[in-house]
Amino acid sequence: MEARGLGIWTWVFCFFLCVSGLNAQSDPVCYIANGKLVVEIPSPYSQRALDSLIADFDMNGPELRQALATGRWDYFQQNGWKVKTYRNGKVRLRRNFYSYRGDLDDWLSMMFVNNKYNPFQPGIPYMDAPYGVNRFNRKRSVWQTGDSTAVFVLHDYKDAREVLLSGSFNGWKTAEDKMLKTDSGWVIQKKLRPGKHLYKFIVDGAWKPDPQNLLEETDGYMGENSIYYQTNTRFSLAGFTDRSEFYLSGDFCGWKEREIPMTKLSNGWECSVFLVDGTYQYKYTSGGFWVEDKGNPLKVNDNNGGFNSIIQKGEPVVFRLKGFMEAKNVYLSGSFVNWNPNGIAMARVADGWEAQYVPGKGTHYYKFVVDGKWMVDPASADSIDDGMGNRNSYLIHQPNHEFVLKGFSEAREVILSGTFNHWTESGFRMKREGNVWKLALYLPPGKHLYKFIIDGKWTLDPGNTLWEDNEVGTGNSILWVYDY
Amino acid sequence: MLVELSVDSIRGDFILDTGAPHLVLNKTYFRSYPRFGEVLASGVSVAGNVGNQTRIGKLDFGGLEFNAVDADMVPLGHLESTTGTPIYGLIGLNLLARLELNIDFEAGFLEFFPVNRRGERMVPAAADSADVELNMTGSNRQLFVDGSIGGKMLRYCLDTGAETNLLHNQLSNKVMQNVQLIKRTSITGSTGKVSEAVLGRIGSMQFGNQGYPGLPAVILDLNPLKAAFQEGFDGVLGMDFLYRHRRMVINLSQRKVRLWKRAD
């Protein structure tokens, strides 16, 4: 009886398998056959796999779904596909590759440059967040000995003949910074400005990332560069020593709770961080408990019944709006407060309105909001198109390079345009000082291409011997901004 | 793979580029050099770039000195934009003709050893048998070697100047059955013309008795490059392939390439 019962269930199971097998969904596939690109969509197909095919192979999703539903393939046939529908519902699309029929250098630029500006360039420190915190193994290998000095230690390789330090701070030079052999390893002291630095050791000619440093990023050659932050801000919190852990959190790290661990001291907690110039809000946190920095008088309402502490790094800027004395509220808004219309409340002064803010290095775009009405800064002749037909005032704060154009004293207008402002024709207006035109900008490290537009005519920088060809044969001037 | 060297009084980083037949100078940094006529540069990363021929006085390459070397002077701005560092030029194969080149990928260094007429190193190397020993095929202008996919013999250009592997899209079905397609992309050039590339993974590429499973490659129409090289070949193997090795030795006199694979 038991055996017969089992037999019945086996038959039921086999029947179920056969039925489900008949309706089994298969995945659409893409392959190359006879030099042609082939897309095969079985019937029935898995919706999820079809979604992947549309995303991965850049197919027109709405058209493909409609064609599968209606059996009308006109769109694909008009775009070069040969379509074959099988009796079992399977569809096969087939077409030639789009092959390039043009100049080879254009083909190469497509292959190698992709026409995309990539701010991350291996070997050049790039901050994708406005803060940095060091992380080492238990045997720390870089010690900050002052605001602008650090000691690098390589604990291993005691039998090596020669060890050098090479990094973004010395232009990746391979013979400049020889390390000294000591009892505790190979040592060198370097002057470093606060910020992110990339480095490697060269041990008897072989490049090696720091084995004690947990922070690394790609070196662009299948290897890794070690990352060290020379910090510029120490946060400290008194008390709470009964807690086992405490963290620093703020808008600079997206208010993540467990991102920046603090070190426990006998009377409190502390941590050292590198902060890019700017204005930030922060708090300390431990296991869902949040506390403001009681030692810091600068704070704002956190909209939750408490306060966020405020820290400002860098040089402050005073924004002034003259007049509008009858206005009830005036706010400063801009790229530095994500264009929040109530970004920074301006205070009424004798002849108008005023607000102080630390915006950080770079070019910042702003407007005043007077009783809800947006307006450019009437005191500044500098405004720029926002790409949607509106104009914004701009502020260039703490520039690191000055563009100078000599010999065009008769020109009525000179505009600076380049990769740093996406070649905007209504770019940065240069200022005449005597017989020369000048403009100072803050530019991140790396390669920048630019031109002057002198009375409407695009012109190479006559004072710069470095230039390269462009697609229209007129050339672009080159500026390399270094981090050291 | 960047190497710092001096050309007369100019010092800068050059790419070691086995896909280039000879020395190439970036026009940006050598504009003052004499021009002897127009050239069409060849080499995977510069093919088709129009420039001029020139001659340099002295080239100092890790202590090796070359005098009166002919070079192509072409724009290399696209390589600078990709690498984010000033590129003064490319060290092509002709500078390596009388040398044995040893590249240690793990340690990141290059060594050069002078060779005699038979192509043997003046200072013999310690015995260390390679995992793969390849004979160069075709001309000495590029580093061509033979290997197979799906049992079909193919010819590749081994190129230290290329990051990715490239495979011609017109190869036989026997080859393509071994390629799993992952992603398709259309690429629009500065003149608005469109080309198409597909990223794939090669099931098994074989050199001698060594297999290379899962090698990534961009599959595209290589005809523009083949026309510029004036050589028939089926693909380019760049650093995506070479970094699977811990060491490579190139000996152009013996027309040999030896490879030592990394431990899995």
Image: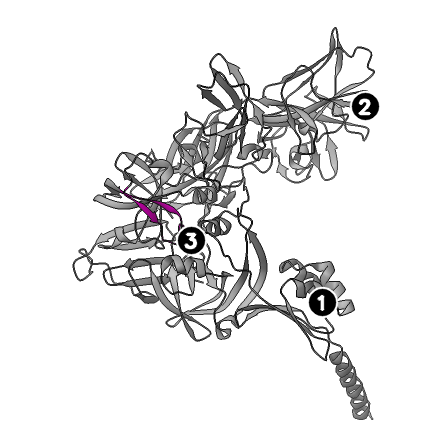
Q: Closer to the camera: disc 3 or disc 1? A: 1
Local secondary structure at mark 1: loop
Give whichever of A244, A366 is nearer the camera: A366
Q: Residue at label 2?
A: A372
Q: In terms of secondary structure, where does tag 2 sit?
A: loop
Please check whether the numbered discs 2 and 3 fall on a single chain: no
Q: Please tell me whether residue B52 belongs to the stretch shown in magenta.
A: yes
Tell me the residue that label 3 is attached to.
Answer: B162
The Cα–Cα distance between marks 2 and 1, rounded to whole angstroms, is: 53 Å
Q: Sequence order check: which comes first, mark 2 or mark 1?
A: 1
Q: Helix, strand, or loop for circle 3? A: loop
**Residue A19 drawn above or below residue A406:** below
Q: Chain of mark 1?
A: A
Residue B191 location (% of width, % of height): 53, 47
Percent x, y of residue A199 = 44, 39
Q: Residue furthest top?
A: A350
Q: Quadrant of the N terminus of chain A?
A: bottom right
The answer, for residue A250, to whether it is visible in the render is no
Query: What amino acid is at disc 1?
Result: Trp
